[in-house]
Amino acid sequence: MPDPMYRQIADDLRRQIEGGGLAPGEQLRTELELREKYNASRHTVRDAIRWLITRGLVETRPGQGIFVVQKISPFLTTLTGDPRTGFGGGEGDIYIMEVTAGARVPAATAPRVGIQQATNQIADELQVEDNSTIVSRHQQRFIDDTPWSLQTSFYPMSLVERGAIRLIQATDIMEGTVAYLAETLRIEQAGWRDLITVRNPDETEIAFFKLPDDGRVSVIETRRTVYDEIGQPVRLTVSVYPADRNQFAVNVGSVPDEAGSGNASPRP
Amino acid sequence: MPDPMYRQIADDLRRQIEGGGLAPGEQLRTELELREKYNASRHTVRDAIRWLITRGLVETRPGQGIFVVQKISPFLTTLTGDPRTGFGGGEGDIYIMEVTAGARVPAATAPRVGIQQATNQIADELQVEDNSTIVSRHQQRFIDDTPWSLQTSFYPMSLVERGAIRLIQATDIMEGTVAYLAETLRIEQAGWRDLITVRNPDETEIAFFKLPDDGRVSVIETRRTVYDEIGQPVRLTVSVYPADRNQFAVNVGSVPDEAGSGNASPRP
DNA sequence: GCAAATTTGTTCGTATGTATT
DNA sequence: CAATACATACGAACAAATTTG
């Protein structure tokens, strides 16, 4: 009892791709040619192509043809770092540093500030009352003009009432919000906790990251709750990254410097 | 110029699912009924259903019908912990502890031991010569009889030659390999580095995790390189988790105990 | 700049196979 | 065994995007 025909066709093409017979970026034969080659209907050929698409092996371009996907060289974000400065945690300045080290050009939009009522989940994570007022600061981040991440930080409005008024201004806080809160309110961040999940992108994310509209690329969401020295939540930062171009590192204890710079590209 | 008809149908059904009109686990109308309701051909209805499937909103069961997917309550793995013991890093005993805390029953197969030549990537990560001999110890881990993760650890064969002979025995090392290497060779692990990536599952993983064969569920791969006090790699542990039932936590600095136990289910 | 040719995208129809109830 | 429901496969036509002449 053999596999269905569309699977046989897909497997044959997959072997050619994974075996190197079809290089990344190379164009496959057209549906009509494949239809003749495998002696199948166009519908069956299209089922085979769809099977390859959902596995991220090929992509189709209307009017052009079918192409083997090119893997994007992934960007690495280190989630651990110095809790006091936030350096090394994938935020602010260190984000710039890690990126430039790889000869890439980073950029971020000016923050879009919002004042809103906390949802249940956010109120829970910030340990404030449901529907209490919070400030959100949203940024889009790019590398080499490629959309790289969407980041939104939520702060209790009480921080603004206590004097941290620049939180509600839609301008960059150059020294970083960590240093700004330390100066203004003597709030030192003592640590954070990241919660990492993988999910499907919503429409905003599909549009911003220019993801294929067929849901084959997931996004990685990190929810970082930052605490001060008395264990009180200071902020919640939600970052979203496309899973096809991002890796994350976590360092625990004493780790050599260049550890694991052996990157994840198996073929030379 | 409106969207294609299959998208309109899919959007209509999506709104019903996300708005709660169709509860998780509930059965949708059959293809034939949908065909009549939307006045479309069966093929068009199937295109709409396929669009929902690739986004993980519904699933089809031959002979039964179309159902709204049930989200699995995710299992949380904490990647940070005490570098000396490995506790709290998602390995060994702590894995048992975290799981039982949630009233779940964990289990793991006896390790399958292999002796092989290192691939380029593994040799690079363990800092040994290409094609030098390494030991692999592979385990399948379950929670409540549900396949939860596949884990393989790689050790340089030199550790065995220096006396850690139990590494090549296919039996559990009850005290944990971390303690065993400390006793036997005085190798203390000083830290580790996790590299987290998201990718599509291979056929082994699809079979073991019972993932849908349509590639809509990704897996999360963590590659943990463990170092001793002189910065020498001791082992590489590769763990694979299905993305639809796993979350990860990373603690940095000082973090309150019950932090973020506010779980990720938005609806009550 | 435009028309033709090429290629994938959408939609209809029909028939048969396979899994479940 | 029969009924039901999804899966696979054939065919046909037109639309939309892109490249080519």
Image: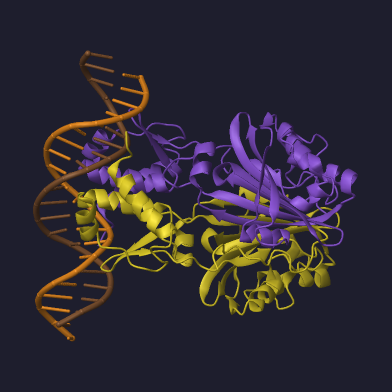
Chain colours: A yellow, B purple, C orange, D brown
Image quadrant of residue A97? bottom right
Provide residue A84's location: percent of width, then percent of height. Answer: 82, 65
Q: Quadrant of the C terminus of chain B?
A: top right
Instruction: In this rendered view, identify the residue nearer to me: B184 or A261.
Output: B184
The answer to whether residue A174 is above or below residue A156 is below
Provide residue A223's location: percent of width, then percent of height. Answer: 65, 55
Q: How many labels were placed on the picture? A: 0
Say which residue appears at 32% left-offset and 37% top-offset. A2
Instruction: In this rendered view, identify the residue nearer to me: B263 or A76.
Output: A76
Say which residue appears at 62% left-offset and 74% top-offset. A170
Say which residue appears at 66% left-offset and 76% top-offset. A96
Left or right relative to B198: residue B24: left
Left or right relative to B92: residue A43: left
Left or right relative to B77: residue A5: left
Q: Is residue A217 visible?
A: yes
Provide residue A236's location: percent of width, then percent of height. Answer: 68, 57
The answer to whether residue B47 is above or below residue B97 is below
Q: Is residue A238 visible?
A: no
Q: Quadrant of the N terminus of chain B?
A: bottom left
Provide residue A44's location: percent of width, then percent of height. Answer: 25, 48
Say which residue appears at 24% left-offset and 46% top-offset. B44
Instruction: In this rendered view, identify the residue nearer to me: A77 or B181.
Output: B181
